[in-house]
């Protein structure tokens, strides 16, 4: 009986010690701040591209098409045009420009720039950002493509694909063969186009186009493309050092903001305003 009593006491003491240890650990854990990992803009953009790539691979397998990515096609002046995603299908060539933007999107196919509006809350309000008209951007890619495939007379479809986190508030376009859509609608849209233009290209023509584009892109790879970008940046910096607008070359003048959150702040502005709206903060 005495032995049982001693064993019982030992068990009770062990249970209490374990309970205290557990409470101490949980207290320490509750005082620790959780580690949060956030994606950079580049990582988000890359993730968006990969999602579109997966969709395109699945579509191509079902419509007997060939996907091609990150093509660098040459212009006559030695510069290059980078195409994010291209599909060669029996229904023609699809040139896809991906935009991993969120927020409200405003734009017209005839505007040079579109507007992205990000709402930050009732206190902070919203911020506006400009982006170069993606329809024009893709039209430039298609123009370069046609110059390199002069013999090709078939259809080329321009698809501007925005992230599902974006919302089109006022986006208008009327050109034939141009489509602005959300990522989630890409599969349906390509199938719609394919049903209308099916039979435009034979299997041999598809393979010929692929071979030609591989040859062109192999000779004008990303290294050359990056070199051109750095060259243009150097030219812009040289203009700034001379007090000239890096966009148009006109003289820069000192101005003072008269309204908005930066009211009273000085900045450099292009003397050709409103034709050129380049600005640079100096305060």
Image (tube, grey):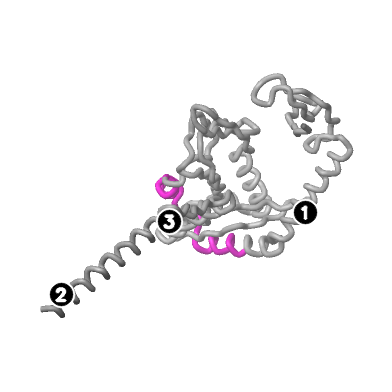
Label 2 belongs to which residue? 5
Residue 138: in magenta span: no
Q: Quadrant of the N terminus?
A: bottom left
Q: Is residue 65 left or right of residue 8?
A: right
Q: Is residue 174 visible?
A: no
Farthest residue, direction bottom: 3
* Image x and y of residue 181, in percent: 47, 41
In space, the residues marked 3 and 1 are separated at their CA atoms by 34 Å
Across and down, in percent, residue 73 comes to 67, 55
Q: Is residue 10 left or right of residue 84?
A: left
Placement of 118 over or under 142, stated as above or below: above
The residue identified by callout 3 is 59
Mark 1 and mark 2 lie on one chain; the one further toward the N terminus is: 2
Q: Say which of marks 1 and 2 sits in front.
A: 2
Crowd class of label 1 (few under 14; some 14 to 19; many from 20; radius 10 Å): few
**Between discs 2 and 3, the one toward the N terminus:** 2
For mark 2, give the secondary structure.
Answer: helix
Residue at point 81% right, 34% down? 245
- Element type where label 3 sits in the image: helix
Quadrant of the drawing holding the C terminus: top right
**Residue extending farthest right:** 242
Q: Which sits earlier in the primary sequence, circle 3 or circle 1?
A: 3
Q: Are marks 1 and 2 in contact (CB under 8 Å)?
A: no
Determine the image quadrant of residue 257: top right
Name the secondary structure under disc 1: loop
Residue stretch in magenta: 185-211
- The residue that label 1 is drawn on is 78
When the figure is inspected, residue 8 is found, relative to residue 197, above or below; the finding is below
User: Residue at 61% of width from left, 57% of height from top?
Assistant: 70
């Amino acid at each position: 009986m005495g032995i049982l009593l001693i064993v019982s006491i030992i068990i009770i003491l062990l249970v209490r010690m374990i309970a205290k240890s557990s409470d101490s650990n949980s207290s320490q854990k509750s005082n620790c701040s959780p580690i949060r990992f956030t994606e950079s803009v580049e990582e988000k953009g890359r993730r968006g591209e990969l999602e579109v790539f997966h969709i395109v691979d699945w579509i191509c397998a079902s419509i007997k098409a060939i996907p091609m990515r990150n093509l660098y096609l040459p212009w006559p002046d030695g510069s290059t045009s980078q195409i994010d995603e291209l599909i060669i299908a029996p229904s023609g060539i699809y040139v896809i420009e991906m935009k991993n933007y969120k927020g409200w999107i405003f734009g017209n196919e005839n505007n040079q720039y579109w507007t992205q509006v990000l709402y930050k809350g009732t206190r902070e309000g919203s911020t506006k950002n400009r982006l170069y008209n993606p329809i024009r951007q893709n039209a430039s890619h298609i123009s370069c493509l046609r110059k390199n495939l002069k013999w090709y007379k078939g259809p080329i479809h321009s698809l501007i694909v925005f992230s599902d986190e974006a919302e089109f508030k006022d986006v208008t376009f009327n050109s034939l063969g141009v489509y602005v859509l959300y990522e989630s609608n890409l599969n349906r849209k390509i199938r719609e186009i394919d049903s209308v233009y099916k039979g435009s290209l034979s299997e041999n023509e598809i393979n010929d186009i692929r071979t030609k584009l591989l040859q062109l892109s192999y000779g004008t790879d990303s290294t050359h493309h990056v070199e051109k970008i750095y060259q243009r940046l150097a030219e812009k910096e040289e203009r700034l050092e001379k007090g000239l607008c890096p966009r148009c070359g006109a003289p820069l003048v000192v101005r003072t903001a008269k309204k908005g959150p930066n009211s009273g702040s000085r900045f450099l502005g292009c003397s050709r305003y409103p034709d050129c709206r380049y600005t640079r903060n100096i305060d």
